[in-house]
Amino acid sequence: MDLDLSPDQQELQAAIGRMAAPYQSAPAGDTSYYLDGMPLYAEMEAGGFTNAAAMDDYGALGGLLLLEAASALPYSVPLTGAALVAPMAVREGLKGPVALAFSGRGAAVRHLPMASTLLIVGDDEVRALDLAGRQVEALRSIFADPFGTISDHEMRQGRRLDGVRPQDVVKWWSVGVAAEIAGAAAAAVDRTVEFVKMRRQFGRPIGSYQAIQHRLAECEVLADATRMLARRAAVTGDAAAAFLAATYAEAAAGRITYDTQQFHGAAGLTREIELHFFTYRLRSLQGELAGVAGSAARAADQLWPRREARPVEKHLVA
Amino acid sequence: MDFSWTDEQTAFRERLQGIIARALPADWGEKSRYDTSSAYMSEFSRTFCPMLASEGLLIPHWPVELGGGGMDPFHHWILGEEMFYVGDPRSYQYMNVNWVGPAIIQYGTDAQRREHIGRIASGTTIWCQGFSEPSAGSDLAALSTRAERRGDGYVLNGSKIWTSGASLADYCFLLARTGGPGTHGISVFLLPTKMPGIEIRVVPSFMGQYSFHEVFLTDVQVPAEMRLGEENKGWTIVRSVLHNERIGQPRYMLSMRVLEHAMGLLVARGEDTELARARAVQAQAGLEAARYLALGVIDRRAKKLPVDTSTNIARYALVTADRLVADFLCDFLHDDVTADIDPLISVGFRRTGSTGLAAGSAEIQLNLISKHHLQLPAVA
C-alpha cells in the first residue's frame, strides 16, 4: 500500500503540468462554449504521452493522470479514448483522437468532431470506425466539450476488433469518466474557493460565511474521494472498483456543479469567467454512461450477481 | 501508487481473522449485538484482550522496548479493521491500546507507568474518556469541571457527559480545570472510577447499552500522583495523543459487512430492485471512498509525515457514507430494522447515528477543512 504517486508517475505528472501550462486560461475576452484543445492533444501525442498507459513505468495511472490534468483545463482535449480506453482495453494502436459510443447511440457523441476513430461498443463486439470520409455532424452544444452526431448506418460500419471485450471497454471508459470528473471537479472547487475569498457582501468575503464554507468543504471531500476512487480503479483494473468510482463521481458531479455555480452568483451562469468550462464538462460527463443509474447497475452486477437475468435497458449494462 | 497489501500484511490479517474466529462464540452476533458498549462485550474483553496479549496482538504497534511488536501504522490499522468487522471484541480497551497507554508512556511518571502500563498491555483493565461536559462538547476547552489544589492533592467537582462505557470502566482519563479559562488551565487525571464522590448515571439512548453516561464528581479527593503530566499542560497531552486518533476507528468495516448482509437478504428474497441495487452501490462507493481516504492518512502516518487535513476529509467521507447505509436500511429493509431481530441490521442502523459525533462532530471537521485546507477567511 503506497497511496502516493511513484517517482516515475510524479515525473510524468510534472511533465504533463508543464505541457498544459499554456492552456490554463481561456484567451482574454473569449466567450466560447468550448475551447479547442487539439493543439495540446497533438503535442501530447507527438511526445508519446497518449501512450503512457501502455508503458510499464506508468500503467493505466499514466493515462489517468493525463485525463485528470486535461479535464482541469478550460480547453477540451480528447484523451479518454486515445490515452486510456484504447491502450487498456483495445491494446492496438488506433488513430487518435478516439471517440466512444454505445452501438446505436450516436445522437450526441463527445469529442466526435475532433476524433479520427470512433470506438463502438456493442452487446458482444467492439468495432473501430475510421472516421476519415465519414459524415460527422458537429452539434451546437452548450457543454464544454464538442459533441457530434453520426447516422445509425455509419454506426453499423467499422472493423470488428477481435478479442476486444465490450465489458473491458466500458470498464476503462468508466475509469476515464471518473478521472475526468475528478479533474473538472477540482478545477471548479479551486476556482470557487478563490472567488469566495475575493467576493464581498455585507462587508465581508462571502467565503467567511459558514453557510458557504461547509458546502465548499463538502465539495472538496467529494472531489478528493472521486480522485482516490478513480486512481484505485486504474491501478487495480478491477471492474467493480471502476463502476463504483464512476457511480461516486457521477453523483459528486451534480452536487459540485450546483454549489460552485451557486457561489458565483449570476456570474456563474455566464461564459465570461471560465467556470462554465468545468461545470458544463461535469454535467455532460455525469450522464455519459447513463449516470448514477447506469454505473450503479454495472457495479451491482459485479458486487451482487443476480440469481436470474432480468431485462435491463441495453445501454445500462455492457 | 500501490493499492495492494504485502504478503506479510495479508498473512497478518489472515492470522488475526483466524484468531478472532476461534475466540468468538458461535452466537457472537446474538450475544454481543456488535455493541462495543454492552456489558457482555465489555466482560468478554476481559478474557479476549489477555488472549490477544498472549498472541502478541494487543499492542503490536507499540515499540518493542515497551512490550509491543514494533509494527507499522498499516498493521495497527489492519488490526482495527479486523476488530471492527466483528464489532470490536476489545470493547473500550481499544482506547487503552490506541492512546491511553501511549499517553501514560509519554507523559506519565515511573510510578504511573508501573501502575497502568502492565495492566493495559495485558488486557485486564478498562478505561473511559472523561472529556465532554454539558457546556463543553465541540468547544472542549470550555470545560468547567474544577480540580482545586488542597494540601498534597486536588478536590474535583463538576460533571462529565456522553462518557462511553463509564459504568463498565475501572479508570477514567479525565480532563479538569486547574487554572484559568481556555486551553492553558487544563490538567489530565488518571482517575479510578470507584472513588468516593463519583456517581455514574447511564443516559438512555438509541445507541448501545452503555454508550452514554453522566459522571458527577462531588468533592472527589485525589492525590497529586493521579495527575498526568504537568499542571495546566493537559491540553498539550490531549492534542498530541489524540492527533493520530482523529480519524477514529475503521467503522466502515462493519458498515460494509452490514451492507453486504443486507443485499444478501434482498437478493435471496428477490427484492433487490434496480433502485435498491443502485442505492446499495452508492453506499458501498461511499464506504470505499472513506476507506481509501483513511488509508491515505495511514500512509502519511507510516511515512512519518505531519498530521494534516486529510484526516478531517477522511472522517467526513465516513460520516456521509454511514448516512447512506442507514438510509438504505431504512428504505429497503424496513421490517428488519423495525423488528430489531437481526443483529447486523440493527447495529448498522443504530451505529451510523453516532458517526457524525464521535471523533469530533462532522461540523467541526468541515470547519477544519474550510480553515486549514481551503484556507477560507475566518469570520471577522
Image: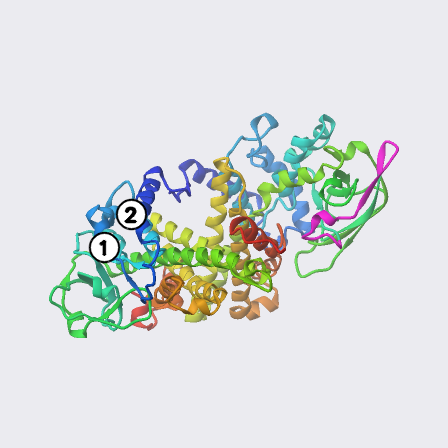
Q: Numbered disc 2: what chain?
A: A
Query: Quick one: B74 or A17, which is closer to the camera?
Result: A17
The reply, left or right, for residue B279 in relation to residue A155 is: right
The three-letter code of the residue at mark 2 reads Met
**Mark 1 element type:** helix
Q: Is residue B44 magenta?
A: no
Q: Is residue B136 magenta?
A: yes
Q: Is residue B184 above or below residue A144?
A: above
Q: Which sits earlier in the primary sequence, circle 1 or circle 2? A: 2
Q: CA distance from mark 1 to mark 2?
A: 11 Å
Q: Looking at the rendering, in which quadrant would you find the N terminus of chain B?
A: top left
Residue A19 image label: 2
Query: Quick one: A147 or A315, which is closer to the camera?
Result: A147
Q: Position of residue A197 (x, y in %)?
A: 52, 56
Residue A39 image label: 1
The residue segment tinted magenta is: B134-154
Residue A25 image label: none
Answer few, some or many: residues within 10 Å of disc 1's Cα (few below 14, many 20 plus, some between 14 and 19). few
| Numbered circles on residues, count | 2
